[in-house]
Image (cartoon, rainbow, N blue to C red):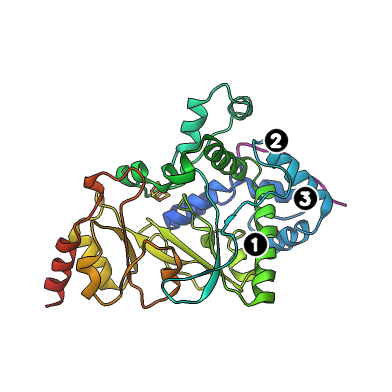
């Protein structure tokens, strides 16, 4: 028999004592989704027993009664109709500029940093804001290492992100993941499983970005990391602002690119990162000076460049609300790189 879960807004104390020694990215994601252990206790899972938790999640993803509950819960927290996708997936497959192969791409967009909380404050009369206020919902920062500049210029505020309905949808998704984490994650798991099956059947590679406009280390959570082990036909990629020591590359995890920003990372830091072997993405005034740098690629056409390990520096053009101060001078960085290599 399926038991449905109740919402416990305060989350759990599980693992609090061991958090002191964990990388920040791991502490962040454990706190973000702490509630899931309380919810799984209803299914006989002991806190910290990742194998049992994963087995229950695989089972729930096939349980019609649980899925009905999960979709209803999502709807009650401002979400879309049942079965609506969590991911934004491009229509058909596209030929990549970087490798020339055909791929599909899916991205999960949420509300970055503290944008969900800010939206609730700006829209106090919205039913979602009222529900959150009544339930005493406290939201966590989704981008711990974001900077003032990147928050201001975040892609969250460009393109479709500026449409009020889209913005609310992203806010609702972020809230739902924190107030009914189990339902949210089972929906995500089920949708990824379908993509994985399709990729296996068709042979068309499917690239997934879990963090379109957030920065969460899914691979460092004992439960959420199961997606990287279970779905080997999917290619997970993400940009992150966590430093390498906080969020190292994992065998079961996304291919990571460190995203640098002018108000945190000096030219010297950027050069040191490149020389250390880290792959980076960088917003620059022009690609031209980079053209002679091995491993540098114009990354404006899409994220597929990440899949090719020979691409070391993804050069992006300013988007969103980028100010001149948010943009690196390509000539300056390339000159510093050449000098460091001389
Ligand atoms: S640019 Fe990245 S780290 Fe910065 S606010 Fe947006 S999603 Fe978060």
Residue 180 is tagged as none
Image point (49%, 33%), residue name: 117
Task: Kindly state the secondary structure of the residue where label 3 is placed.
Answer: helix
Residue 52, how many percent across, how many down? Answer: 71, 62
Q: Do we see residue 5 in this rendering?
A: no
Image point (46%, 50%), residue name: 213
Q: Do we see residue 175 in this rendering?
A: yes
Q: Disc 1 to disc 2, how far (Cα)?
A: 23 Å
Residue named by callout 1: 192
Which badge, 1 or 2, comes first in the chain's sequence? 2
Quadrant where the C terminus is found in the figure = bottom left
Which badge, 1 or 3, comes first in the chain's sequence? 3
Image point (77%, 50%), residue name: 67
Magenta region, main secondary structure: loop
Which badge, 2 or 3, comes first in the chain's sequence? 3
Residue named by callout 2: 76
Residue 104, how many percent across, how many down? Answer: 56, 66
Relative to 2, is 247 on the left or the right? Answer: left
Task: Kindly state the secondary structure of the residue where label 2 is placed.
Answer: helix
**Residues packed near mark 3 inside 10 Å, few (<14), some (14 to 19) or many (20 plus):** many
Asked if residue 8 is among those painted magenta in the image, a careful observer would answer: yes
Task: Look at the numbered disc 2 and say if its residue's Cβ is closer than 8 Å to ligand 1.
Answer: no
Asked if residue 307 is among those painted magenta in the image, a careful observer would answer: no
Bounds of the magenta span? 1-10
Residue 228, how many percent across, how many down? Answer: 58, 67
Q: Please tell me how many numbered marks the rendered image carries.
A: 3
Q: Disc 2 to disc 3, how far (Cα)?
A: 14 Å
Residue 197, how many percent across, how many down? Answer: 69, 70
Residue named by callout 3: 67
């Amino acid at each position: 028999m399926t038991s449905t879960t109740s919402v416990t807004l305060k989350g759990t104390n599980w693992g609090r004592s061991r958090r002191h020694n964990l990388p920040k990215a791991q502490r962040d994601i454990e706190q973000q989704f702490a509630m899931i252990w309380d919810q799984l206790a209803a299914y006989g899972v002991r806190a910290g027993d990742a194998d049992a938790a994963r087995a229950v999640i695989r089972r729930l993803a096939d349980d019609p009664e649980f899925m009905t509950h999960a979709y209803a819960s999502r709807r009650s927290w401002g979400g879309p109709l049942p079965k609506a996708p969590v991911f934004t997936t491009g229509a058909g497959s596209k030929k990549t500029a970087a490798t020339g192969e055909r791929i599909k791409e899916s991205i999960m967009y949420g509300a970055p940093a503290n944008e969900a909380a800010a939206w609730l404050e700006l829209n106090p009369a919205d039913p979602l804001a009222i529900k959150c206020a009544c339930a005493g919902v406290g939201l966590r920062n989704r981008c711990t290492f974001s900077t003032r500049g990147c928050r201001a210029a975040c892609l969250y505020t460009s393109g479709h992100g500026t449409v009020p309905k889209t913005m609310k949808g992203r806010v609702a998704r972020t809230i739902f993941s924190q107030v009914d984490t189990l339902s949210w994650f089972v929906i995500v798991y089920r949708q990824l499983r379908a993509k994985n099956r399709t990729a296996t059947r068709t042979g068309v590679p499917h690239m997934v970005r879990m963090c379109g406009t957030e920065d969460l280390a899914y691979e460092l959570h004992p439960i959420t990391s199961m997606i990287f082990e279970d779905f080997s036909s999917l290619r997970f990629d993400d940009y992150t602002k966590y430093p390498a020591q906080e969020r190292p590359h994992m065998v079961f995890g996304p291919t990571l690119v460190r995203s640098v920003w002018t108000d945190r990372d000096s030219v010297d830091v950027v050069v040191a990162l490149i020389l250390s072997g880290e792959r980076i993405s960088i917003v620059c005034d022009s690609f031209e000076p980079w053209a002679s740098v091995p491993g540098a690629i114009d990354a404006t056409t899409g994220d597929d460049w990440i899949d090719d390990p020979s691409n070391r520096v993804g050069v992006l053009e300013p988007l969103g609300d980028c100010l001149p101060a948010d943009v690196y001078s390509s000539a300056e960085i390339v000159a510093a790189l050449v000098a460091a290599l001389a």
